[in-house]
Image: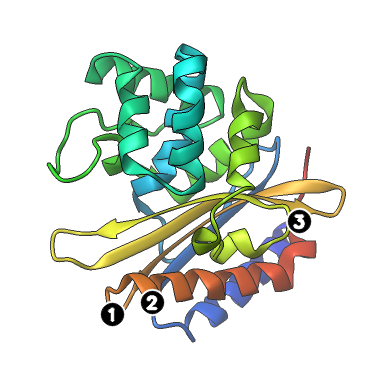
Amino acid sequence: MPDDEISSLASSFDAYAETLSGTVGLAYVPVGGERVVALGEWRGGVAWSTSKVPVAIAALRAAPDAAKDLVTAAITWSDNAASEELWSLLGAPADAGAAVEAVLREAGDHRTRVQSRRVRPEYTPFGQTEWSLTQQALFAAHLPHIETGSDVLALMRALVPEHQWGLARFPGAATKAGWGPDARGAHMVRQLGVIPNGDGWTAVTVGADPESGGFEEGIALLDKLYEWVRGHLEQLPAGR
């Protein structure tokens, strides 16, 4: 993708972001590609439920029969208890973290360190992993090419209706969102997606910190980011 086209998209996104009530960001890369482009000020943070994607893949590999129904619940309606059970299938916390990290490495994310300690007692350990938009986009771009990745992508295309916002509004898109409050109670909302684009696919990750700190306002921001992506999708690189 030529640098002038990247600059044009960045300028468009920055102008659009200024109209929104919060801090937003986006990263994109063609499926199978390595060159990630990040736009906006929001560059990453706690993974929240987006981390269930690599956890599900690791568990399906380790214990496919035990994991199958749990993965469906963890992905399609983001069941936290199911994801905790998937994590437990991977062994002791350190072993589980290593197994999930191995999935990230295989899928092109060579930087992210999976949180295996329960640093916030009320939340999953892996959900508190710090995951940048760029590394998450690389991971999403290689999901179709790794073992059990296609199984999880199929579930990401079958979300319950109440989770079909943001990038999930694209017909045929495979997405998983994550959200939660910081220590002050302000919510962050993020999402990863593999989106049909012409004859190929584009991996897109988005994130937002709404000014109000409210979850519903975060969803509204991701809907706005969907609208920007929809308007520029033909300009984004696609791969297979």
| Left or right: residue 110 compared with residue 108 | left
Name the amino acid type tagged 1.
Ser
Residue 109 pos. (x, y %) = 49, 32
Residue marked by disc 1:
212
Against 169, residue 98 (above or below) is above
Q: Is residue 99 visible?
A: yes
Against 4, residue 47 (above or below) is above
Residue 144 pos. (x, y %) = 68, 32
Q: Quadrant of residue 156?
A: top right
Residue drawn at point x = 27 percent, y = 73 percent: 213
Name the amino acid type tagged 2.
Glu
Mark 3: few, some, or many residues within 10 Å (few <14, many ≥20)? few
| Left or right: residue 131 compared with residue 161 | left
- Give the mark nearest the N terminus, 1 or 2: 1
| Left or right: residue 183 compared with residue 240 | left
**Do the residues under discs 1 and 2 have CB atoms within 8 angstroms?**
yes
Label 1: element kind: loop
Against 195, residue 221 (above or below) is below
Q: Which mark is residue 2?
A: 3
| Outermost residue to the bottom | 19
